[in-house]
Image: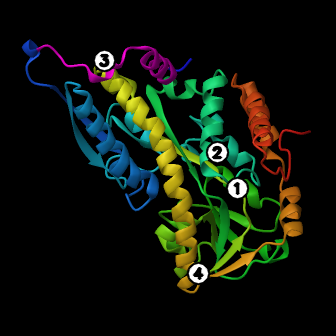
Amino acid sequence: MTTRRRLLRSLAAAPAAVLTWHPPAARGQPQRLRVTVAAGHPPVFLWVKLLDEFFIPEVDRRLKEAGVPLAIEWNRAYGGTLAKLGSELDTMRDGISDAGFVSTVFEAAKMPLQNVSYVCPFGVEDVFLLASIVERLQESIKGMGEAWGRHGLVYLGGAALDTYHVWSRKPIRGLADLKGLKISAPGPSANWIKETGAVAVAGTLTTYYNDIQTGVSDGALTFATGAGAAKLHEVAPHICKVGFGAMFGGAIAIGRRTLDKMPEAARAVVLAVGREWTRAYAQAQTALAERRMAEMLAAGAQAIELDPAERRRWAETIPNVAKGWAKDLDGKGLPGTAVLKAYMRAQREAGVPILRDWSAA
């Protein structure tokens, strides 16, 4: 059972006085703890914005209300000023930062099981449902949740990204229009255009705009909130609404050493706020996705609704990399097949329409 769940359960069973604990007067001034919070993305991206505007102030508020003798001095290091995109985990593990957002999509080697949604496109689009599914898998499948602990981290709350589409310089109405195009795609999402006639180009939200503008790529495979923040519609005004599904992009986490320096009541506050951050983020992400799409269309972008038959054809055209992904992880002693089957099963149980069962032979 994860540390997070044990603490939350112990608090639920404990007297209410635990959360309003006051230290003996003899102990004097509250303990002060400096916590450096890092993120590779700048605060214009919602997961960093809510880390800054929800998680940090909410932890401070609850510590104060509960009378916990701990004053946290937050040192904010966003936008790659301390941890570059894809190095947040290493930075936290090595003690350079204490907490922050880990972009698991760029940590496929260290956090492969957290990328299960990226090998199973055309699935769940509800961001909170996806984050909840991943969290349940982390808690129930040995080897998945433990990935955080292996790097000295404690998972706090997950962030799923709204459903992915394709932003391009020229209209894409079906698979035939992909032939010869260069599409920027992050990490495992490059597999979504394999065998379609297009070629994947490595990139991230911080590079897409310039890559498209300079001709390095003809478009990008991304999501509305990210595209809106990066203003991709200015260089790629055609939006092919493929609906690849929501994707688990990462999570806020804290170093085990940093968490252990806190009184038990403070640790409980941090874990509880992390859990609530997941829901707050999902609600904000859903609303922002709708708003960003409307803003881009109002600014001149053109949306193309992919025909359902063409969408199914796309899903059936790309290779089933999920099976190979799972088998490879099995060979490394990780529960790849178990996670893949559990992920597909969780979607079916939630009533998600399954366009293709990636766990099938």
Q: Which residue in the structure is indicated by mark 3? A: 17
Q: Residue furthest front?
A: 16
| SS state under label 2 | helix
| SS state under label 4 | helix
The type of residue carrying mark 3 is Ala
Instruction: Please name the residue shown 38% across and 35% down the image.
Output: 92
Of pointers 3 and 2, the one earlier in the residue sequence? 3
The quarter of the rendered structure image containing the C terminus is: top right
| SS state under label 3 | helix
| SS state under label 1 | loop
Asked whether, in this view, residue 68 is left or right of residue 301, the answer is: left
Of pointers 4 and 2, the one earlier in the residue sequence? 2
Q: Which residue in the structure is indicated by mark 1? A: 245
Q: Which residue in the structure is indicated by mark 4? A: 297
For label 4, count other residues whose C-alpha is less than 10 Å away and answer few (under 14), some (14-19) or many (20+).
Answer: some
Of pointers 1 and 2, the one earlier in the residue sequence? 2
- Kindly indicate the quadrant of the structure image that contains residue 211: bottom right
Q: CA distance from mark 3 to mark 2?
A: 33 Å
Please, what is the dominant secondary structure of the magenta stretch?
helix
| Residue 344 x %, y % | 78, 39
Q: Nearer the viewer, mark 1 or mark 3?
A: 3
Instruction: Please name the residue shown 38% across and 25% down the image.
Output: 268
Q: Which residue in the structure is indicated by mark 2? A: 129
- Kindly indicate the quadrant of the structure image that contains residue 27: top left
Q: CA distance from mark 1 to mark 3?
A: 44 Å
Q: Nearer the viewer, mark 3 or mark 4?
A: 3
Q: Is residue 6 depicted above or below 208 in this figure? A: above
Of pointers 4 and 1, the one earlier in the residue sequence? 1
Residues rendered magenta in the picture = 3-24
Q: Is residue 75 depicted above or below 304 in this figure? A: above
The type of residue carrying mark 4 is Leu
